[in-house]
Amino acid sequence: VDLAIEASYLDLGTQTGNFLGDDISVSTTGLMASGLLGFNFGPFGLFAKAGMIDWETDAEVLGVTTSGSDTDSVYGVGAKFQLGSFQLRAEYEVIDIDVVDMELISVGVAYTF
């Protein structure tokens, strides 16, 4: 059984569109912290994670700029393949920001120490 903590920065970029003939834009960033619980099966492993995100959103709609921020939950599951201290990971995460659940599928590399 593996136990770990993870911190990350999330930048969702800026989404733009058109509403009633006027341009709109929304950008969201956040800092996440999660605890991980993992089970290893040789070099392969499975893990689950749960934590929090402290997010901030800036929006411009109909020429009016507004912003919001809060702290909400993050959770997910994943699989890894590990060689030494390096891991290849695939994850599915749900980021629960107020009334919107964002789903994120990612593949990445991690270094453990």
Image: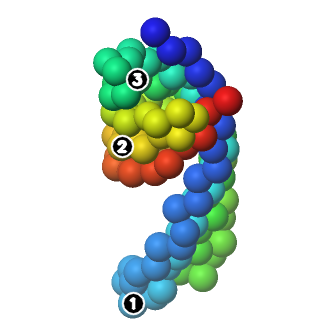
Amino acid under disc 2: Ala
Res 88 quadrant in image: top left
Which one is in front, 110 or 54? 110
Label 3: how many Cα within 10 Å (few below 14, some 14–19, many 20+) = some
Mark before the other along the chain sequence, 1 or 2:
1
Amino acid under disc 3: Ala
Q: Is 41 located above or below residue 97 in the figure? A: above
Q: x, y percentage for residue 90?
A: 36, 43
Q: Name the residue under label 2.
A: 90
Local SS, label 2:
strand
Res 66 quadrant in image: bottom right
Amino acid under disc 1: Gly
Mark before the other along the chain sequence, 2 or 3:
3
C-alpha distance separating marks 1 and 3: 44 Å
Q: Are marks 2 and 3 in contact (CB under 8 Å)?
A: no
Residue drawn at x 53%, y 40% is 86
Which labelled disc corresponds to residue 83? Answer: none
Which labelled disc corresponds to residue 48? Answer: 3
Residue 93 visible to an observer of this rendering: no
C-alpha distance separating marks 2 and 3: 12 Å
Q: Mark 1 points at which residue?
A: 21
Q: x, y percentage for residue 100?
A: 40, 46
Residue drawn at x 51%, y 15% is 2
Residue drawn at x 58%, y 28% is 34
In the image, taking residue 56 as reference, residue 110 lies left or right, namely left
Q: x, y percentage for residue 1?
A: 46, 9
Q: x, y percentage for residue 14?
A: 54, 73
Q: Is 56 located above or below residue 22 in the figure? A: above
